[in-house]
Amino acid sequence: MWSYLVRRVAQAILILFIITMLCFILTRLSSDPMAQYANKPGITAADRAAIAKSLGLDQPLPVQYIRWIGLALQGNLGNSFFSKQPVLTMIEQRLPLTLILMGTAEVVIIIVALTLGLVAAVKQYSFVDNLITSFSFIGYSMPIFFIAFGSIEIFAVQFKVWGLPYLPTGADIWDPKDPLALARHLVLPVFSLVAIQTAGYSRYLRSSILEVLGMDYVRTAHAKGLSNRAVLFKHALRNAILPFVTIVGLDIPFLLGGALVTESIFAWPGMGRLFWEYAERGDYPVVLGVLLVTSTAVVFFTIIVDLAYTIIDPRIRLS
Amino acid sequence: MAATDESTIISTLSLKSTETKQPLTPGQLVWRRFRRHRMAMLGGIGIILLVLFIVIGSIVVPESRANNTDLRSRLAAPTSTHWFGTDSVGRDVFNRVIYGGQISLFIGIFAVVLEVTLGTLIGGFAAYYGGWVDAILMRFTEAMLAIPSLFLLIVLAKFIGQNVGQVTILGRTFSGSIGIVILVIGVTSWMFLARIVRANVLSLKELDYISASKALGANNRHVFFSHLVPNTLGPIIVAATLGLASAILTEAYVSFLGLGVQSPTSTWGNMMQSAQSFLEQGAWWMWVFPSFFIIFTILCINLLGDGLRDALDPRSSKHL
């Protein structure tokens, strides 16, 4: 167990090292932080050289990388070129909003997927099952902007036309005088995320519940006279849900990165939009900071999920 | 008389039985299983219809009509002259859907070709050579998987897409960004395929026929490309089909973010992007039609991919 853990952590550190190198090289080559000074009147070539020197951009790339990673290890991700704020502060400001959006969506997704998967499995090949399966197939094949545009068209645009209370789609999501504003702003993006992501989960649950229902111990449970409900919830569901826990656990760290497209459609000021806004400007400390935070979370969650799995399923032995 | 009758009957009988006992080739077996999969057949027919629509459409409608702006009839709802309405500069949405489909499918197919090539080579080499080659390639794969794919895509698209000109192929001018989008999607999507191929080759390379081939003097290249890759083709085909669906979807996302193919060349993704600004004005036809085509395409490809999985790998048919 301990040697396994040590090996996994060593591997994770190696992977993180590769990630930082990959990200550093790509972001540094793709963005020129000096571009914003290029055509400004009053800034001479000597000034530009001085600015580059003060930002450390005159050094060769490997030196820049070592300097950046050295500071990052001390918890300093540098300052944004554009807003001059420390990157870590900017991430700390955006992270709660992303967590509110993605956390709410994830909870709703899990509840809906569990319900749909369960119903579809229990009523296999019935009309309801076919309906759920067809809808999850369609949801699985849909780009999120279709459902997002559709819900904006109906609940924001048409409701306004019909004189009904309509839902907001952007602008200020936080209003100190009206705490419910946040909840109202959540409805449409959460709805869109749920409509898209539930599909995959519920299909997965359906098949794993069906697999478990065909097992011998389920037949034994029926044979000893348990009610369908008891068999389903006390015996079948517990085992069917195990692989699902892994899948959800592995998806959770990706929630930190936010939903870039959804956040940009609904003007939600989360991590995805932070990344997108600053990637467009070539502000590489921010881009690197977001990449580092999310991928570190992904790498370490993978280990945590593996360890958690051995606790919920004692049959699994780590080696 | 009776004897000859009997013998002819026997001979025809035996002829018949040898005919029916003729073993089916693996291809015929796959086709038989695939044919039974009704939804997959439906998906296949849908894709054929879609391709026919795009091919016939591009023959009937010249490209100039799809890019023709007409500011007098901008943002017009669907009518008998403009079946799918017009966009913000008066271009016909129906014509743009045809040409957008061409580009979207083109990008999807070539991105998958790149994805399959990279995935097969990286996964295959990792498994075949093992040891430190395997360790390095797989750590690299895991590193790529840990970065949220859309983030990676954006950084990469900005990296290689800084200044591209126009490309002229067969007398038609395309925005050079098409090549960049293909490259970016291919380079960010090969990881799952590499893992599948690796797992397959790992088990295949221990089999006796590989040792036999080596004993006969076959070199690594021959063993890899003539034995290992063909025997992994089933999972590769399935992954490639499902990869095509996600490549088309990714193209839509990339173009939607404005990093993909640039106007006037239309794709289903950048049509959605141009629709976003006119959402509040109720110009629903600008996004409903392109997204209908995206959903239809992805749905058909996914159905086909599921059917192929069941047909090529009967052991995994329990997945749904």
Image (cartoon, coloured by chain):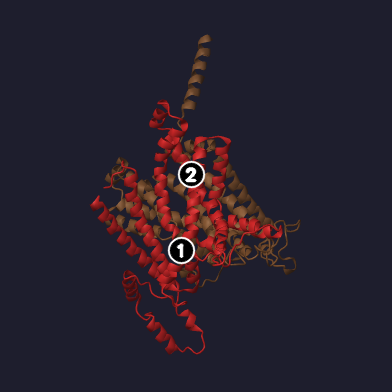
Q: In which quarter of the image is the N terminus of chain B?
A: top right
Where residue A319 sits in the image (x, y, percent)?
Answer: 26, 47
Query: Which residue does the numbered mark 2 point to in the structure image?
Result: A114
Where residue B192 sits in the image (x, y, percent)?
Answer: 41, 52
The residue at 51%/84% (across/down) is A39
In the image, residue B173 above or below residue B317: below
Which quarter of the figure has residue A239? top left
Q: How far is mark 2 from mark 1, CA to CA?
A: 26 Å
Colour for chain B in the figure: brown
Where residue B319 sits in the image (x, y, percent)?
Answer: 46, 40
The amino acid pointed to by label 2 is: Leu
Which quarter of the figure has residue A74? bottom left
The amino acid pointed to by label 1 is: Pro
In the image, residue B102 above or below residue B317: below
Colour for chain A in the figure: red
> From where the camera sits, is residue A1 visible?
yes
The residue at 49%/65% (across/down) is A270
Q: Is A133 positioned to the left or the right of B224 in the image?
A: right
Query: Which residue does the numbered mark 1 point to in the structure image?
Result: A96
Q: Which residue lies furthest to the left in this view?
A: A3
**Residue sitting nearer the eye, B97 or A152:** A152
